[in-house]
Amino acid sequence: MNTININKKFGRFSEHWTPKVIGELNGQHIKLAKVQGDFVWHDHKDEDELFIVFKGTLYIDFRDGRTEVIQPGELLVVPKRVEHRPWTKDGEEVQLMLIEPAETKHTGDVMDEKTQTELEWI
Amino acid sequence: MNTININKKFGRFSEHWTPKVIGELNGQHIKLAKVQGDFVWHDHKDEDELFIVFKGTLYIDFRDGRTEVIQPGELLVVPKRVEHRPWTKDGEEVQLMLIEPAETKHTGDVMDEKTQTELEWI
């Protein structure tokens, strides 16, 4: 049980769309991710997903045509079974925290070249 | 499902030691709290508790004599059944986010004048 400095953890990786685990509580993982460009449309059948943005502006599209804009100091919970597509504008790198059940795949049930099958703790 | 600005939510209350709920995911509440001074020793029998500090410096004492110091941009997970006592120094107000199961009482099994029995959403 140690205090974790979020920015220092962001400094420990540079890959995009590959969330790293920094902690866990009650069966949920606390993850950090750097993202850039477009992600795939996906949903999570049984898991709500929390996004907290620390740097940059994250856009998340929904199938009803709405786009949520999430800036540093802002958060969004995407409920289970809601299809969404995260993306960033003009190649900006966005740094964010995710909290979701430990069994969650970040691409949901969609298998894609971006799908990460092994989780790395940092 | 709307993006939440954390600072704006902090602006919506001023009481200390009375966490407000701003969201939920997977049976967990996302709460904001302003704290100042000493809290009571307590633990949570079945729930891990996540503290993320946004303003000020939070101290958490443990029964083994250790004190964790959590500053803005830092987080700590306190595992279930670990007794802890949060406090702040010299009357500083600390602003923090908590994530814990919806059924968690913030004073654990300790009933105290600070124990909050009704949760308020803001």
Image (cartoon, coloured by chain):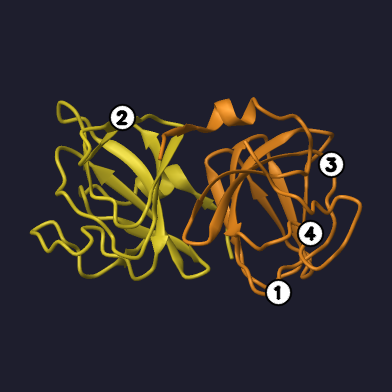
Chain colours: A yellow, B orange
Per the model, the C-alpha gap separating discs 2 and 4 is 36 Å
Residue B89's place in the image compared with A49, above or below, is: above
Residue drawn at (13%, 56%) of the image: A114
Q: Is residue A36 left or right of residue B59?
A: left
- Mark number, residue B25: none
Q: Is residue A67 left or right of residue A122?
A: left
Per the image, the residue denoted by label 1 is B45
Q: Are the residues under badges 1 and 2 in a single subunit?
A: no
- Which of marks 3 and 1 precedes in the sequence? 3
Give percent across and percent down for residue B95: 66, 36
Q: Amino acid at mark 3?
A: Gly
Q: Classify the position of the C terminus of chain A by image quarter.
A: bottom left
Look at the numbered disc 1 and give the secondary structure of its residue: loop
Look at the numbered disc 2 and give the secondary structure of its residue: loop
Look at the numbered disc 3 and give the secondary structure of its residue: loop
**Label 4 crowd bin: few (<14), some (14–19), many (20+), radius 10 Å:** many
Residue drawn at (39%, 38%) of the image: A53
Q: Amino acid at mark 1?
A: Lys
Give percent across and percent down for residue A89: 19, 28
Per the image, the residue denoted by label 2 is A57
- Mark number, residue B107: 4
Residue drawn at (83%, 51%) of the image: B39
Per the image, the residue denoted by label 3 is B37
Q: Amino acid at mark 4?
A: Thr
Q: Is residue A91 left or right of residue B111?
A: left
